[in-house]
Amino acid sequence: MARTAIEAGKDDAEALWIAGNVISFLGGEHATAASVIERGLVLNPNSALGWFASGAVSYRESQPERAMRLSPLDPLVHYFTGGLAMAHVIAGRYEEAIEWADRSLRELPRYESALRNRVVACAQLGRIDEAHHWLGRLLEITPGLTIARYKALYKATHPPVIIDLYAEGLRKAGLPEA
């Protein structure tokens, strides 16, 4: 369906960024997705959601630096700031990750991705009590979450190095294996 949207919507910036994001997220075809989204951004360089999709593909490609340079004007700011938190976690800048996760959580206190980034950043900094606290909040939203379930949920959309980094942080925070 995403490929059909690309063909039918070749002059529609919104169709292109949506289809590109789907191809990246569900199909793992990040280079194709980046190209399609870039075409959409040429058509509408002011598309905040297009820039968000471009950043999402960048972190899926393990390129957090590019993801962090994108415009902060996204109308769904909690997604954008949550994405920046993830980019900082991936880059090993855990203090910055906490700052961006907190910004995201101020907008949407139950945003799962931001909570997960907060847990992992705290755990990687050795702040285990704090990580455990945030893990409790994460488990309120995702009861039954385990390391195995986390890996199963994200193996199709995240590179193994990112899966391993997050699994390590969640494990340090006290998330059970199974």
Image (cartoon, rainbow, N blue to C red):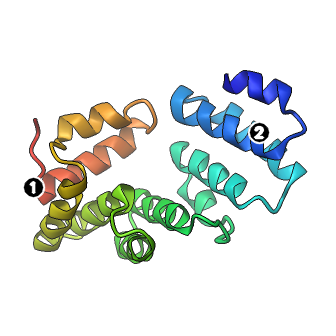
Q: Is residue 32 left or right of residue 78?
A: right
Disc 1 from disc 2: Cα separation: 41 Å
Please tell me which of labels 1 and 2 falls first in the chain.
2
Q: Residue at x 61, y 54 (%)?
A: 55
Residue 14: image x %, image y %?
77, 45
Residue 174 shows which numbered tag?
Answer: 1
Quadrant occupied by the C terminus: top left
Q: Which residue is mark 2?
A: 16
Residue 157 shows which numbered tag?
Answer: none
Where, by quadrant of the figure, is residue 172 drawn?
bottom left
User: Please, is residue 21 above or below residue 125 in the view?
Assistant: above
Mark 1 neighbour density, 10 Å: few (under 14) some (14–19) many (20 or more) = some
What amino acid type should be assigned to the residue bearing mark 1?
Answer: Gly
- Dot 1 falls on a residue whose secondary structure is loop
What amino acid type should be assigned to the residue bearing mark 2?
Answer: Leu
Q: Residue at x 52, y 30 (%)?
A: 26
Q: Residue at x 68, y 37 (%)?
A: 20
Q: Is residue 32 left or right of residue 120?
A: right
Q: Is residue 19 left or right of residue 87?
A: right
Residue 168: image x %, image y %?
21, 50
User: Please, is residue 53 above or below residue 87 in the view?
Assistant: above
- Dot 2 falls on a residue whose secondary structure is helix
Mark 2 neighbour density, 10 Å: few (under 14) some (14–19) many (20 or more) = many
